[in-house]
Amino acid sequence: MWGEVVRVNVKNRLDLDLNREVLNPDSGAKSHSHPTYLSRRSVTIYMLTLGLVNTYDKIKLHEAHYRSIARAAPVAYAFGFNLALFDYPFKMNAEELVDFVKDKTTIGESGKYLKELFGSGKFFVFDLPEKGFQPQFGSVVVTTSHPASEKQLQLPALAELINRKKSFLFLIGLGHKGLPDKLFELAQYHLDITSKGVSLETCTAIGAVPAVISGCVERMKG
């Protein structure tokens, strides 16, 4: 059972049925992934996903785009997160993007960890959805230094929910504009990863969000 491999077509959908370990109807967002092979051993009953939203340039490809992916991949891999890209200006699917990043930079051991994520079904490329994010990613969390009081999620409460096997998608904006207002409205929660209202640069946030969350979850387990 544990060695069985399931073929999953995620070209147009990516809804994980946690009981059957297959994909269900999508939420309307287009995926650029090839069919993915997921080992039953790697499938968990909940997911934590680092979601990078391109707000830098939606038309022209810049070094900042592929370097952000290369930086995020080892962080996601190290702390057991998925990595999802939204609205990046790439005319390629996830598999092609792995090779592209590998050839463009030595960051992340020349794409080693991005390849690992893709191989285990944990790397995804999507357009920015108009009607809501893919439901298997769980609750959407905007990371911000200025959370709305009615949506603010404190780290201890988040860690408790994760320990209860709840899935979350943590959104980080790429670029000085930050995340668009509509995502603040769409998100179920807002999270200040510093708990002090400190604004973090994008690459710093990419490292801090998974690391701080993982540490908090582990402390609560103990």
Image (cartoon, rainbow, N blue to C red):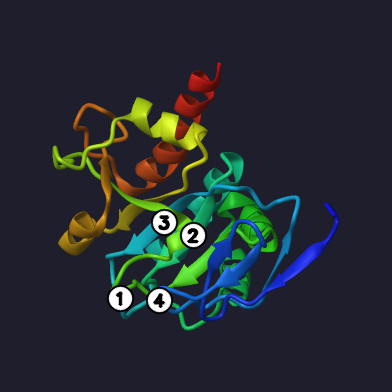
Mark 2 vs mark 4, CA separation in Å: 13 Å
Residue at the top extreme?
A: 222
Q: Which residue is mark 1?
A: 58
Q: On the rendered structure, is 40 left or right of 168?
A: right
Q: Which residue is mark 4?
A: 29
Q: Give the structural element (helix, strand or loop) at label 1.
A: loop
Q: Earlier in the sequence, mark 3 or mark 1?
A: 3
Point 57% across, 75% down: residue:
33
Query: Which residue type carries mark 4?
Result: Ala
Query: Which residue type carries mark 1?
Result: Lys
Residues 146 and 162: in front is 162
Q: Given this view, does label 2 or label 4 mark the residue nearer the observer?
A: 2
Q: Which residue is mark 3?
A: 51
Query: Which residue type carries mark 2?
Result: Gln
Check if mark 2's residue and mark 4's residue have beta carbons within 8 Å.
no
Q: Given this view, does label 2 or label 3 mark the residue nearer the observer?
A: 2
Q: Is residue 192 above or below residue 115?
A: above
Q: Which residue is mark 2?
A: 136
Q: Is residue 154 above or below residue 27?
A: above
Disc 1 crowd rating (10 Å Cα; few below 14, some 14-19, many 20+) is few
